Image (spheres, helix red, strand yellow):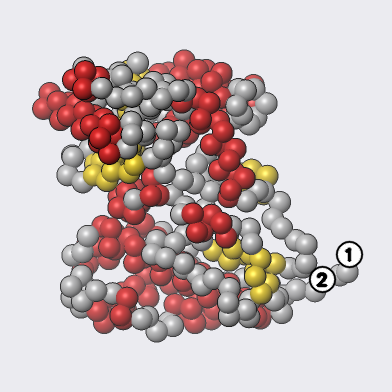
Amino acid sequence: MADIDLDFSILKPEYIDAAVNNKLDGQTFSNRIWQNKANMIDKLQGSILDAMQGNTTIDKVGKDIQQTFNVSAYESQRLATTELTRVQAQASQDIATNTGLTKHMWSATLDTHTCEECAELDGKIFDIDDDSSPEMPLHPLDRCCWINVPFDGWQPSVRKDNMTKDIIDYQDYNNWLSDIGDVESKNHGSKIDITDIAIDKVPIVDIIGFDDNQNKLLQQKHQKLLKIAQGDNDSNEVLNVLTTDFYNEAMTLGSQNGVDPGGNPQAVALMRTATENSVGWIHNHPGGSTFSYTDIGQFLKPQLKFITIVTNQGKVFVLDKKDSFNFAGIYAKIKEIKNKYGGTVTNENHDLIVNDILKMITKYGVKYIK
């Protein structure tokens, strides 16, 4: 291989400033939503600059805009996320120009929030000066980024799985999704059609910190979810992301083998603006199965207080965090269990891994109802 002489001036302040201070297209911001557009743009540019320099997070930027300009969490998070993606893309291209690079790779996020268009582009390489290449951000709430390619034939060796938070061997989005999809479909089993009898038999479950009225309301949410799955989704999977005060919720329809929370932008925004233990996930498993490995991974997110499954036969499973919830302990134990079965979740070991996790999960501050 020939010697490569590259001067990577990564994220020089002038690159960040140039990207952030590019004139924002005022037409993208609704006058109805943004009452003081000039002030909002100034505020956003300053916040994005702080985020690029590592002084704040994009979630905090969204919440700050929401509070300052009295707009919805969804609108503020959509704006902050989209603009940060734009700024990162511009800064990356400036770095490439400065170092003499000519190609870059589209990189999507490995989780179920990623849309089909971004998933298809993941791992594809484009000439930087090709006017026909896709523009980033591709859509509102886009979380993709460009990776500059140092030489022909190069690709990353590892990347982050945003579902498990593990660093994994590099694979593109569709191959990654195929792997987890195969595992999930095995676990879910054969679909059972929802009946009115099953809906009526859904029990009340006791969530830590809920009073009787809140537990009754959760029962009604479970019943409503099954009715939607029955009437509108051919008894397939449905997810409802809701705040624990029941003030906000976002419903997403899925398939027999799973549901993509990214299919509803309001669900995505609700998760990104949620505080610790302020959200619950309720969903059905058409095959009557208990929690999957992916479900457990979602439950570990700091925003989630609880996650429930209501099966198509009306049975309810619950994972609920106690005050004593020990994330570090349970995360380490899950890695130990995975290593016991070869280090990777597969079709062959999925149920064994999940069963071992559920057997020990109550030791780490989790209430498990089955």
Residue 204 location, quadrant: top left
Q: Residue at x 66, y 66 (%)?
A: 125
Tell me which residue sits at (75%, 73%) in the image: 6
Q: Position of residue 37 (x, y in %)?
A: 24, 79
Q: How many marks?
A: 2
Q: Position of residue 31 (x, y in %)?
A: 20, 76
Q: Is residue 259 visible?
A: yes
Question: In percent of the image, x 32 and y 44: which residue is there?
Answer: 252
**On-image quarter of the N terminus:** bottom right
Image location of residue 304, percent across then percent down: 34, 37
300 lies left or right of 222: right
Residue 114 vertical placement versus 90 (above, below)? above
Mark 2 = which residue? 4
Q: What amino acid is found at the position of numbered circle 1 in the picture?
A: Met
Which label sits in the foreground, 2 or 1? 1
Tell me: residue 25, above or below residue 362. below
Residue at the (38%, 40%) spot, across then down: 254
Residue type at mark 2: give it.
Answer: Ile
- Distance (Cα) linking label 2 and label 1: 9 Å
- Label 1 SS: loop
Q: Which mark is residue 328?
A: none
Image quadrant in which you'd find residue 103: bottom right
Q: Are marks 2 and 1 in contact (CB under 8 Å)?
A: yes
Q: Quick check: 98 left or right of 5?
A: left
Q: Is residue 367 visible?
A: no
Badge 2 marks a residue whose secondary structure is: loop
Q: Left of 77 or right of it: where is 86?
A: right
Hey, which quadrant is residue 71 in on the image?
bottom left
10 Å crowding of disc 2: few (<14), some (14-19), many (20+): few
Label for residue 1?
A: 1
- Location of the C terminus (image quadrant): top left
